[in-house]
Amino acid sequence: MSLSIRNQLPGTVTAVTPGEVMATVKVRLTGGQDLTAAITLEAAEDLGLAAGSAVRALVKSTEIALATAPVERVSIRNQLPGTVTGIAAGGAMASVKIAVEGGELTSAITSESVTDLGLSAGSAVFALIKSTEVSLATA
């Protein structure tokens, strides 16, 4: 199966916390970072997720915000440190490539944000991803 979602990071489930309708799934990415996904309980059961399950974390580029420093006191669970490797900017939007331990991410942000953050190749950034925007696929 081919997907338009370019951000696909491999990892291993470390914990599944079920709720009435949703479950949170902790994933240790191959680069060593921890990621949290909030998915439906039904999806977690259908995928057979348990500690030790191999998964791919999928995130659309439009769902990755960028910061130039860690953000404190925010509800966003996932903050992955990385380095900008390239920027393709248009009139309104930009595609920012980020190297993270164990892979690469692409973030689609406004060109104005690229300027306001002073981003260029080599810039240190943090990719901010809400747990509800992380999908999981079994490997």
Image: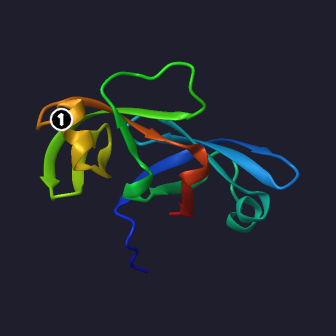
Q: Nearer the viewer, residue 105 or 68?
A: 68
Q: Amino acid at mark 1?
A: Leu
124 vs 136, left or right, is left
Q: Which residue is mark 1?
A: 119
**x%, y% of residue 117?**
24, 31
* Residue found 51% across the figure and 19% down from its top: 72
Q: Is residue 124 at least partly visible in the picture? A: yes
| Quadrant of res 30 | top left
63 vs 136, left or right, is left
Q: Nearer the viewer, residue 74 or 78?
A: 74
- Mark 1 Cα within 10 Å, few/some/many (few <14, many 20+)? many
* Residue found 13% across the figure and 32% down from its top: 122
**x%, y% of residue 46?**
73, 68
Q: Nearer the viewer, residue 124 or 23?
A: 124
Q: Quadrant of the N terminus?
A: bottom left
Figure check: 19 above or below 1: above
